[in-house]
Amino acid sequence: MLSFKKIRLAESCLPLSTIGEFGIIKRLRTRHAGKSPEILKGIGDDAAALKIKSQITLITTDMLLEEIHFDLSFTTFYQLGYKILAVSISDILAMGGKPRYFLLGMGLPATCLASDIDELYSGIMNLAKKFKVSVIGGDTCASGKGLVLSGTLLGEAKGIITRSGARPGDAIFVTDSLGDSAMGLELLKKLKIKKPGPRLFGTNLKALSPDIRTLIKKHLMPEPKALEKTSGITSMIDVSDGLLMDLSHICDESNAGALIYIDKIPISKELALAAKKMGADPLKFALKGGEDYILLFTAPSDIKINAVRIGEIIKKGRCLVDARGRKTPFKAEGYEHFKTKSYSVHRTA
Ligand code: ADP
Ligand code: MG
């Protein structure tokens, strides 16, 4: 029989493509999670939460890497600036908090111009104004290969909503339609929408038809939206890696199962039309497509809230339920670094 030590040794030799992003996070969480009475939440949620002198501070950090998260032939610096802040705002909202202070680390390749940074910050400041976020610092370095952005956002909260509070009997809600961003990316690649130019490219949204613009804009410039009220919510996450993956995080952390009613999943008319034209199933985008940056939460089923009810939390098992009540088990499939092919290849496959 293999000893525990040998199993651990064998595991540490596994390639990242086998362990995956979430396997690595699990290892770090088991081995290195900080412990202090001030840490309300450490590794394992959308943001860390610290309670210092009765004040709760939320902290989240997210990276956007060229060739992994974006392709400069599809996105402008303005759109990138907007997105690097949007993804972090989404995490603070998912903890039930209010975004406040932002820091940006930049690794810049030699091809960048000062005007590119102006454009990037113009995108950041536009969204920062909407959420009353202040930029308070960052770091600036040369990058040997590709553009690297690393955003850190601090937020404040009166209480926190974690991924671990879902209970059997709770209903599952989402705040907006799913799959639009993944379809937006698919369209960018299929239509090869590029602004011709000698150096960097980017998508000129104004030149697109309204339906296509809506989908592509949702991918390039996601619009995080806060819930009007959070009282009664038992668990929450933002949908960044796809509905099945992110709901699985809630199930894992809450030690519970889930049923998703397929015909209740909100699919926008734009996604439905684009999928029809492509001969694709819009549901594939809605279930496994990432980067919607909408909120997925659970709450007692009698809650009055402005969101779409798509399922319920059960004790055990994870199934999709069709209109006739037939159940199909689902797995935590969606986007996972090292396991899913990167942006420049195909993110939603
Ligand atoms: P999200 O998609 O909401 O940004 P992630 O899936 O990136 O969340 O991260 C999940 C959890 O793992 C978070 O608590 C995050 O802080 C933690 N985490 C991710 N990478 C690391 C790391 N390199 N070291 C420590 N914790 C990490
Ligand atoms: Mg998140």
Image (cartoon, rainbow, N blue to C red):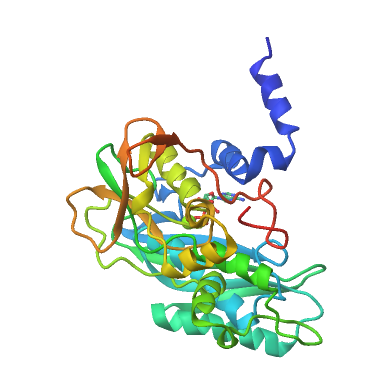
Rendered position, 84 above or below 244 = below
Residue closest to the eye, 50 or 79: 79
Query: Residue 202's spot in the image, x, y percent?
Result: 67, 80
Q: Residue at x 30, y 58 (%)?
A: 308
Which is more toward the observer, 249 or 282? 282
Q: Determine the residue positioned at 31% across, 35% down.
A: 314
| Quadrant occupied by the N terminus | top right
- Which residue is pictured at 45% across the width and 42% down the height? 248
> Is 126 rendered above or below residue 306?
below
Q: Closest to the observer: 63 or 167?
A: 167
Task: Residue lying at the far top in this picture: please name it.
Answer: 1
Rendered image quadrant of residue 13: top right
| Residue 248 appearing in the image | yes
Residue at left offset 59%, top offset 72%: 104
Residue 198 position (above or below residue 26): below
Image coordinates for residue 191, horizontal then vertical, percent: 67, 73
How many numbered badges does the structure rendering display? 0
In the rendered image, is residue 44 in sight?
A: no
Question: Left of 49 or right of it: where is 210?
Answer: right
Q: Residue 205: horizontal and vertical position, in percent?
A: 57, 83
Residue 81: % across, % down: 58, 77
Please indicate whether residue 194 sits to the left or right of residue 212 in the image.
Answer: right
